[in-house]
Image (cartoon, helix red, strand yellow):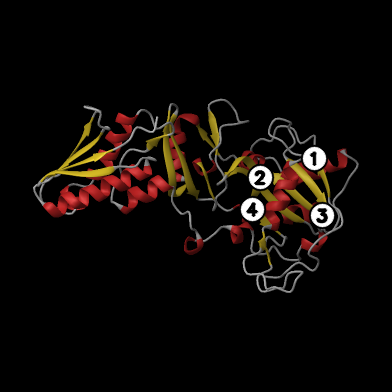
């Protein structure tokens, strides 16, 4: 990859492009951008960057589907499920999308679209950005960078921010690993996601509710390249470096062979319900997955005689009983619960669980 010629710039101008109107299938998005610039007494120059919302890209491409097909569409756009939870409106999923990034519902969106429809993301947003860049060059002669933006949540942080779903003609990653810092120490992890920073800056002047789906950024010519470049897919973390490839509930379930159990709800519910889910997860897959050939059972126990509620585990096979106990403890952890184990008979164990409420 080529590093930026200049690491920082003294100032960046970010201007929202008003007047694009409601974008519909078949419209020339490059022409709409140029006309919006002209209406604001502006024009493209070499080194400018255009950031445009994926929503108008999808609208112009006609990437819509009936809302009643949303679940089917999300499934078709999903490459891998990362986490899923049951909600009153159905199952919410965070997935690795066909478009590349990990995001909610594979980016299938029902906001700011015609009633009864949902929008899909293009499968290759880097190619979309490259086409838009070429069209803008044909119309204006300017060599520009293009970023196709979308909105997503982030682990560990509340709220959403825009990121680069696609990019062309722009240095997307400034990899500083191996370079010295200001004190002469070698940087080992620092890599600036420049295209994401461009998308987030553009979102300060764009907005879903304001009818401003695109922005012009000026002052970033040091990031604009002659060729289209690697694109935003360079920013998608590969499996080998992804420490958080699954949600913690999904990771536990996958590890103990219970990945097919119904998704957990967003609101965990009362303790008996949580214990029942733990029993279901622990015994999923049949006796073999619990470590023995004989049947195993896990029954929910209510509080009695001053004792904590919990699960009673039974198996005539000592190995299967031990395996089941460990599976229950793992399932409890995934529910945010802890348990203490009591051996009450040769073929029976009770796992007591304090009520967190």
Of residue 191 and residue 212, the one placed in the foreground of this image is 191
Image quarter hosting the N terminus: bottom right
In the rendered image, which quarter contains the C terminus?
Answer: top left
Say which mark, if any, is on residue 17. 1
**Which numbered disc flags the more N-terminal residue, 4 or 1?**
1
Mark with earlier residue (1, 3)? 1
Residue 220 lies in what quarter of the image?
A: bottom right
Measured in 3D between alpha carbons, the distance from the residue under mark 1 to the one under mark 3, in whole angstroms, is 14 Å
**Mark-to-mark CA distance, 4 and 3:** 16 Å
Residue identified by numbered label 2: 162
Disc 3: CA contacts within 10 A as few (<14), some (14-19) or many (>=20): many
Residue denoted by label 3: 48
Which type of secondary structure does the marked residue at label 1 adopt?
A: loop
Nearer mark to the viewer, of 4 and 2: 2
Residue identifier under label 4: 166
- Relative horizontal placement of residue 54, taking residue 136 as reference (left or right): left
Q: What element carries label 2?
A: strand
Q: Is residue 111 left or right of 29 when viewed as pictured?
A: left
């Amino acid at each position: 990859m080529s590093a930026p010629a200049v690491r920082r710039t003294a100032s960046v101008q970010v201007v929202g492009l008003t007047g694009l109107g409601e974008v519909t299938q078949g419209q020339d998005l490059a022409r709409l951008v140029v006309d919006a610039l002209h209406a604001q007494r502006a024009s493209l120059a070499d080194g400018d960057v255009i950031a445009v919302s994926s929503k108008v890209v999808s609208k112009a491409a006609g990437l819509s589907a009936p809302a009643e097909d949303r679940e089917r569409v999300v499934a078709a756009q999903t490459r891998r499920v990362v986490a899923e939870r049951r909600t009153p409106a159905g199952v919410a999923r965070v997935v690795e999308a066909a478009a590349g990034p990990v995001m909610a519902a594979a980016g299938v969106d029902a906001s700011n679209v015609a009633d009864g429809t949902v929008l899909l993301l293009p499968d290759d947003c880097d190619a979309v950005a490259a086409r838009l860049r070429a069209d803008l060059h044909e119309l204006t002669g300017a060599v520009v960078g293009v970023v196709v933006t979308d909105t997503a949540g982030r682990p560990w942080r509340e709220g959403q921010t825009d990121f680069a779903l696609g990019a062309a003609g722009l240095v997307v990653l400034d990899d500083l690993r191996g370079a010295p810092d200001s004190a002469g120490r070698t940087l080992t992890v620092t890599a600036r996601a420049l295209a994401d920073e461009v998308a987030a800056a553009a979102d300060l002047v764009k907005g879903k509710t304001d009818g401003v789906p695109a922005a012009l950024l000026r002052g970033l010519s040091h990031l604009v390249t002659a060729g289209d470049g690697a694109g935003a897919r360079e920013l998608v973390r590969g499996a080998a470096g992804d420490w958080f490839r699954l949600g913690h509930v999904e990771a536990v379930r996958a590890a103990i062979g219970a990945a097919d159990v119904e998704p957990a709800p967003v609101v965990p519910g009362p303790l008996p319900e949580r214990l029942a889910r733990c029993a279901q997860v622990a015994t999923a897959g049949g006796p073999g997955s619990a470590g023995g050939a004989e049947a195993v059972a896990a029954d929910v126990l209510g509080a009695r005689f001053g004792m904590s509620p919990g699960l009673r585990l039974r198996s005539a096979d000592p190995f299967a009983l031990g395996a089941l106990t460990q599976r229950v403890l793992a399932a409890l952890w995934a529910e945010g619960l802890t348990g203490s184990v009591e051996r009450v008979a040769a073929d029976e164990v009770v796992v007591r669980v304090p009520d967190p409420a």
